[in-house]
């Protein structure tokens, strides 16, 4: 692999670490350890002394199907994210979707993909309604950073894009389509380490082209043209389109295609890319194709990408143009994007001072990992889904699965209903309306 030269190429001394101002809540509250939502599920367990200035539990996000709180792990005082998946067993579809997300969170082992640290003990099967997953807590996300006054250097953009692609290569190698890549689902910590999160809409790719896939995916601004045009089947290329939109947004500091409706979304895309050829629209549904052909043809205006910002160099625009390709079959793959020269500096920086896969011995040169962008060791298996045909069956299997995940070497955790924040935590069951998955546009 070309790229991160060797130990002789040191990362340049741009500070990546301290400059990200984040959303640390300094709100005062009575939530000491006794008031905390998370408690040890062992009656005689004495938790270690936790620092007095521990922050109160508070909500930090609303995913497509759940709510996330920042809480304290009573076993070590660490701040973690507690995700509540409510009303899991309302229907077969919703319960299988939650089970899938849970299995994925336990499957992932990659530094740029959020994974489960722990799952709370489920109650007896008869009372099993909700699931609580603990993940690492990251202080911010790319959306908050983009809209903040925080300065974003060319190095920031490169190292963020590199990590998005690195995480996505892992997901796609596991045959997983994320289907909701957007800045708010890219968590970032104060050292600029980025992790892809929220797998509420993720699924295993469908190799059978004749099988229909739902169009209720991807937040509109980041939705690929084939989905906007009603394609019945789509591929991992939908995630690459989203990454292209985010890359453009990082460069220009504003949403690249910000439209009011799916039809206008497609208009904005064709204003930049030009009217697609019939061949490029072969995945589209008939109504969408007819709509497009009725419009006056537009020429491409890709040179507009150079005006996004001074960071929009030839190399940046060259890569961006390969992500923003109308025809998904001609769109660049994540693997090929990672081989683009624009990504080299992000890779160099990441593996020089940010990653966990390389290390520098106390006296010596940096030891680089054999594989800079590892694939998943095996694809994510979804055959189990087909065997589940009733809600009760899913419930039993999920109960068993969680019990198997529980770590025997740690004290299990539970929710403390006596805690100060419990009431508002328990009532925060509804996903934020603006975060709900979009409804598909009907062509005629
Ligand atoms: Zn590394």
Image (tube, helix red, strand yellow):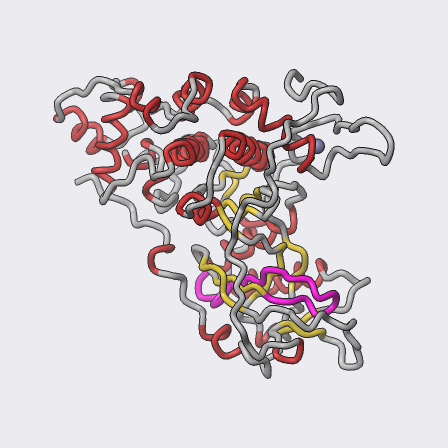
* Residue 337, x across and y down, in percent: 51, 23
* Left or right, residue 31 beside residue 263: right
- Res 406 quadrant in image: bottom right
* Residue 45, x across and y down, in percent: 79, 77
Split into quadrants, the picture shows ligand 1 in the one at: top right
Reply above or below: 365 against 71: above
* Left or right, residue 47 beside residue 244: right
* Left or right, residue 45 beside residue 432: right
Residue at 45% x, 59% y is 62
Residue 13 located within the stretch drawn in magenta: no
Which quadrant, please, contains the C terminus? top left
* Residue 294, x across and y down, in percent: 12, 26
Number of marks present in the image shown: 0
- Res 276 quadrant in image: top left
Residue 210 in sight in this render: no
Q: Residue furthest right?
A: 363
Q: Residue furthest bottom?
A: 418
Q: Nearer the viewer, residue 75 or 284?
A: 75
Reply above or below: 138 against 177: below
Residue at 55% x, 76% y is 29
* Residue 335, x across and y down, in percent: 56, 24
Residue range in magenta is 71-91
- Res 239 quadrant in image: top left
Which quadrant, please, contains the N terminus? top right
Reply above or below: 104 against 373: below
Residue 410 in sight in this render: yes
Q: Nearer the viewer, residue 192 or 184?
A: 192
Residue 72 located within the stretch drawn in magenta: yes
Residue at 64% x, 69% y is 54
Residue at 77% x, 69% y is 411
């Amino acid at each position: 692999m070309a790229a991160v030269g060797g130990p002789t190429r040191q990362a340049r001394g741009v500070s990546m670490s301290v400059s990200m101002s984040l959303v640390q809540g300094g709100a005062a509250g009575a939530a000491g350890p006794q008031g905390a939502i998370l408690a040890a599920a062992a009656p005689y367990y004495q938790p270690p002394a936790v620092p007095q200035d521990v922050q109160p539990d508070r909500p930090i996000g609303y995913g497509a199907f759940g709510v996330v709180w920042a809480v304290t792990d009573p076993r070590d005082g660490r701040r973690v994210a507690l995700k509540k998946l409510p009303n899991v067993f309302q229907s077969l579809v919703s319960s299988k979707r939650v089970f899938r997300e849970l299995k994925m969170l336990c499957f992932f082992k990659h530094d740029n993909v959020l994974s489960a640290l722990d799952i709370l003990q489920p109650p007896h099967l008869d009372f099993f309604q909700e699931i609580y997953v603990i993940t690492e807590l990251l202080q911010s996300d790319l959306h908050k950073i983009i809209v903040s006054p925080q300065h974003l250097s060319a190095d920031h953009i490169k190292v963020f894009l590199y990590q998005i692609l690195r995480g996505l290569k892992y997901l796609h190698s596991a045959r997983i389509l994320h289907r909701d890549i957007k800045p708010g689902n890219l968590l970032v910590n104060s050292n600029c380490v980025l992790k892809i999160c929220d797998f509420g809409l993720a699924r295993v790719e469908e190799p059978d082209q004749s099988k229909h896939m739902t169009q209720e995916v991807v937040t509109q601004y980041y939705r690929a043209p084939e989905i906007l045009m009603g394609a019945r089947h789509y591929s991992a290329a939908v995630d690459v389109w989203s990454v292209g939109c985010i890359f453009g947004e990082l460069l220009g500091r504003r949403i690249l295609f910000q439209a009011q409706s799916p039809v206008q979304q497609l208009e904005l895309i064709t204003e930049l890319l030009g009217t697609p050829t019939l061949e490029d629209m072969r995945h589209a549904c008939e109504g969408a194709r007819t709509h497009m052909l009725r419009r006056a043809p537009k020429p491409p205006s890709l040179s507009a990408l150079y005006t996004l910002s001074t960071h929009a160099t030839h190399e940046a625009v060259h890569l961006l143009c390969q992500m923003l390709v109308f025809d998904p079959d001609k769109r660049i793959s994540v693997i090929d994007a990672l081989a683009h020269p624009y990504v080299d500096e992000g890779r160099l920086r990441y593996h020089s001072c940010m990653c966990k896969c390389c290390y520098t011995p106390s006296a010596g040169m940096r030891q680089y990992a054999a594989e800079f962008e590892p694939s998943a060791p095996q694809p994510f298996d979804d055959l189990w889904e087909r065997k589940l045909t009733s809600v009760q069956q899913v419930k039993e299997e999920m109960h068993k699965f969680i019990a198997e995940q529980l770590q025997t070497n740690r004290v299990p955790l539970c929710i403390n209903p006596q805690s100060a924040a419990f009431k508002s935590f328990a009532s925060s069951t509804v996903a934020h309306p603006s975060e709900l998955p979009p409804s598909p546009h009907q062509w005629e």
